[in-house]
Image (cartoon, helix red, strand yellow):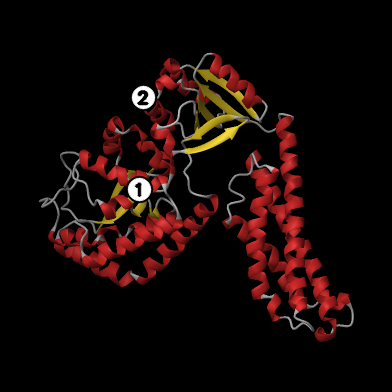
Amino acid sequence: MSDSRRQRLKYFGADFLSASLAWMLFNVLRYYELAFYLGFGQLSDYMTYRVVWEVQLCIPFFWMGLYYFSGYYNRVFGKSGMEDFFTTLLSVSLGSVVLFFLIVLNDIPHSFEVYYRFFFFLFGMQFCLAYAFRAVVTAGGRRRVRRGEWVVRTLIIGGGETVEGICRRLSATGYRVQACLGEDEIDSRLSSILSGEQIDEIIVAADSTDYDRLPSLLYSLYECKCPLKIVASKPGGPLSRARLTNIRGLPLVDVTDNNFSEAGKNIKLWMDKIVASLAMVLLLPLYIYIMYRVRRDSPGPMIFRQERTGYRGKPFMMYKFRTMFVDAEENGPLLASDNDARVTPFGRLMRKYRLDELPQFWNVIRGDMSLVGPRPERKFFIDQIVERAPWYYLLHNVRPGITSLGMVKYGYASNVDQMLERLEYDMLYYENMSLAFDLTILAYTLRTVFTGKGV
């Protein structure tokens, strides 16, 4: 079992125990405040009552579900006491309000003031126990880091005195430098190091004078599928679009993470799956009709499959209703254009209303895609884009989407120049990701679908 998974299980256990204990103590208070109305002679009779026990068993799972959607379990290392305090405070505040209205208001106290005591006791007990239990787990993790039992195995790209200073700072925070590579050694030694050493993270210590060619370097390293950070010695450029972290005063730009909150990531993931599942059920008659029309329109398969590059640069198979004649790309990859002779008559109608994208709800359920995100491209075109816009790799930090800001504001691209123009919209989305922004893009998409302004 990995260190991160073991630490995450400890947080699970701590939260389960603290929630169980807090609710048990809250039930004791409820008994003494409502003993006359409840009709139980002794505390033990009340605590062993079937309904009380059923709720007692369910409450910890409610809290753990809330903590999951708050993003608390996403990152288990590097937590601080202040981070634990504020994330716990926000989660417990929300959860206490929900439980108060769902459960506590059903009680009939002898005085309205009892409700105040119930709420503040529930909130205070849940917060104090949750924070205390989490603090113990976090402190234990920090001790193991200091003793060198838990380390982040790191590969440093760069050289000179800058790298020596970085190594000294990192060694005090649980990082272990496994190897250092100069930029001129990447082609000859990188593959052997990655195959021979377990590397958890790559840090690039590029000099500020190298920023012009830094994006090309980053894209080559991105294919290593490791978290990638750059020492932020100079602001601006494509690095300004990535998340900034700080380790012992060392500013690092995390180019394999996005600016979406941890809570937003989890909520978006599950809302995507729920909406996609409902859509596939509700639109089943439309699916059947479209498949019938595709088959009648031209010979060939009803569903078109094509490999695209997705999250973290991982290739996946994307599904669409076929809009072109079979063997439309027998002479090589080619983007569709206006009045493209390869597009079937019904395919042209589908593209206008975006109906060809409907099978991608299955990609969303599988986790390959999201409802909203940059459109996935083929590697053939990505290689051409990267030559002129190397920061394109940042879009691989999020799941590609069925719809995107680029699609609703720009539309289909028929050549690489247009893809680069559309890329500006995708970068704008990347820099401003939020659930509210996703809802706005979905609203624009629905307008496109119903008005037929998709071409």
Residue drawn at x 63%, y 41% as measured from the top left: 4
Residue drawn at x 18%, y 45% as measured from the top left: 414
The residue carrying mark 2 is: 212
Would residue 314 be seen by someone viewing this image from the given angle?
no
**In the image: residue 330, left or right of residue 21:** left
Figure quadrant of residue 57: bottom right
- The residue lying furthest to the top in this view is 160
Identify whether 117 is placed above or below 438: below
Would residue 448 be seen by someone viewing this image from the given angle?
yes
**Element under label 2?**
loop
Q: Percent from the top left, x then y, of residue 454?
A: 22, 58
Identity, as a three-letter code, of the amino acid under mark 2: Asp
Residue drawn at x 65%, y 64% as measured from the top left: 95
- The residue lying furthest to the right in this view is 42
The residue carrying mark 1 is: 374
In the rendered view of the protein, which quadrant contains the C terminus?
Answer: bottom left
Disc 1 or 2, which lies upstream in sequence? 2
Identify whether 97 is placed above or below 91: below
